[in-house]
Image (spheres, rainbow, N blue to C red):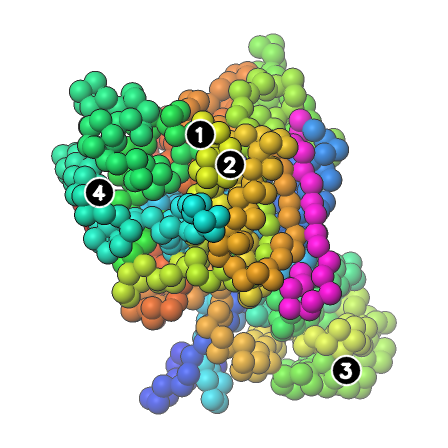
Amino acid sequence: MESLADTPWDVTISGTGLAQSLLALALSRSGKNVLHVDRNPYYGGPEAAFSLQEAEEWAAKVNEETGELPFENASISSESSADPAGQLAASRAYTLSLSPQLIYARSQLLPTLVSSKVYRQLEFQAVGSWWLYKPEADDSSRLYRVPGSREDVFADDVISMKSKRTLMRFLRHLGQAQQSGDLSEEVNLSLEEEGLAAPFPGYLATKFQVPAELHGPLLSLCLSQAPPQQTSAQYAVPRIKRHLSSIGVFGPGFGALSVKWGGGSEISQVGCRALAVGGGVYVLNTGVKSLEYPTEQEPSDEGRIQIQLTNDELVKSRFVVGSNWDLPAEARPSPECDKVARSISVVSSSLASLFPVAAEGGPVPVGAIVVFPGSSLGYADDSPPVYTLVHSSETGECPTGQSVIYSSVSIPGPEGQSMIETAMEKLLQSAADPNVKVLWSLRYTQLGRDGSHAADITFPSKNVICLPPASLDLAFDDSLIDTVKNAWELVMGDEAAAHEFMKFEDREDAYDEE
Amino acid sequence: MSESTSTNTPKPSSSVKLVLLGEAAVGKSSLVLRFVNNDFQENKEPTIGAAFLTQKCSLPTRTIKFEIWDTAGQERFASLAPMYYRNAQAALVVYDVTKPSSLTKAKHWVAELQRQASPGIVIALVGNKLDLTNDGNDAAGETPAEAEGESAAADGDETAGETQEGQDVTPGDARKVPTREASAYAEEEGLLFFETSAKTGTNVVDVFTAIANAIPESSLKSGRAGGAGTGQTSLGSGRPAEDSRVNLGERGPATAKEGCAC
């Protein structure tokens, strides 16, 4: 086998998270010598997807090597049951995603995957209804289906006519803003006059007289993980616009997608495969141990950085790219991170009622979002909501008859986990038969960006490109595309202009049309 | 065996995802190039570029469209992605009959497939570079395993028994892996078994035909055939409402930049 040291590398990418893998995809036709390593034995970094056994190994590693991964405090519990109907299947029957995200139809990720031709290796599925948990006075509880489109608003039989009128006025306002051009520009121009800096609930009440009963549903559509009063209209309004404008783009009744078999992990693998096809060399289980920078006295290697890999091989590379957790400790800045509590639970019910077909001729959704405002769970009004993303077995993540519930709340640690637990109880009470069991759960804290920090690349040293922490957003954060493009431009230098970012022709012989 | 043999009456057609595995430089890509293009390149560079090829295989009752995933060189540092195996209905595990270590590696890949891939996967063990042995040089009509389907391994073994004697010691014969050894292993593991030459074409088409025959009818009807590739085959056609798949290619580029759809 040839030695890695023999190649003068142009770029060494460390880590196979979504950011690095999209960069790999971007560089897949560049003609650059790219070495792509990951110290983990799996692809996907913080977006990885695991079987049960892999998840157990991962959890042990998180706890042993605190600080080495963007995760903390992982724990697993599983319930053994005598009832054969509610049993865990074999480990490999599960593909559980550490960072489940939905992708809006208007996300820039989709045109990127299409123009780079890798979308054919992915299977996209519809993510359907939004549900809001509402406790009832008689101690019963129910899930309220949030009207996600104008048609839904008309059809809704809970909202009063008067409320519908104010809601339609607000939605019309969003629609007009949309037609008049670029969303962000529009927001900036009218920031002052519209009072967008105010908390979103106040904005809705004062500007559009939207009654309080509709604040929760509208908040749920913007997927804000902050408490209501800390969610500004400036943050919420463009996100609701994104939601509404995504409905119907790829089919009737839905506006968001997920990728079958584990979401971001699949996209990562497809990006890495594209670079491998383009000549990139892949080594797993091997990270970057240390970097030695070129001195001016030694111009022989054209200023290449000497990299010691964790398997003690030495390679030389012009650029080194990685996230904070993929670069050696001395070479990285300590990132400012937000933390969220997350859990993944396998339950013994298909939770079929959560996945109605939203419009005639539409696909059966494979995912549903259930939102639990902090106050609805008995916490203070200023506590953040718990989001659960429910995936049916159609996602390929669990066997038929079961489903996977991904939960997230912006309070890390035991407090957040106990909020999640309460939300899970309510969810199962509301949507499943009484015999439902949680068969398996993984709880953990995840580090990343909540969207309020800038997603800028940093440069610990010359030609060392440090990618920002992954987004904790529940919807794919389009700023990642800009980050990747930025890194690509740095690596390509003057050649960037000649190559088009992520725009490729089909490879020869591939995918001949019938 | 190819498009040219297709008749006027349309037969049911199914896609089958087939993955290639084996040590570097055993001739995985060469086998596929021989099968798909009936071509052979000496001193072929490690696989770069073409990592996905398709080829139809016409059987008496149906047509199988192989979607062949080559490794793109990711096998070199044991860095293949799970996506690669996922939903594969067939695998070609290739070794080099002149290199015993490559059979050891092939056995590792078989174990990996049994661990990682779909339970019903059809695995063919293929000893390539038969042209470098005396068998490859003389016997044009002699094939180590001609049988179809599940019995291939057993028949291969039988044939091997007749031709095996003294093979290892023949002067000028580069063979280092006796047919008997590999076929016995294949039989034990329930694999199809062939010895091939991508260079001369010996047995190459037979491998794929045997695989096509061995794919259970039931797994073709499931509609999940081929995983990633099948989305492409139905581009432009309407989808039944109960299907959860969303067709990105058809609508994505056209509508993603246009106005509000709600």
Nearer-the-camera pick, B22 or A453: A453
Location of mark 1 (residue): A381
Marks 2 & 4 on one chain: yes
Amino acid found under the numbered disc labelled 3: Asp
Q: Secondary structure at mark 1?
A: loop
Question: Where in the figure is residue A374, as x and y percent of width and height?
Answer: 47, 35
Residue plotted at (29% across, 56% down): A253
Q: Pointer 3 and pointer 2: residues touching (CB < 8 Å)?
A: no
For marks 2 and 4, give the CA distance: 26 Å
Which labelled disc corresponds to residue B157? 3
**Magenta-tinted stretch:** A67-88
Which labelled disc corresponds to residue A163? 4
What chain is tagged by disc 4? Answer: A
Q: Is residue A70 left or right of residue A218?
A: right
Amino acid found under the numbered disc labelled 4: Ser
Marks 1 & 2 on one chain: yes
Q: Is residue B116 left or right of residue A349?
A: right
Within 10 Å of the Cα at label 2, are there few (<14), some (14-19), or many (20+) other Cα atoms? few
Residue A496, quarter of picture: top left
Q: Secondary structure at mark 3?
A: helix
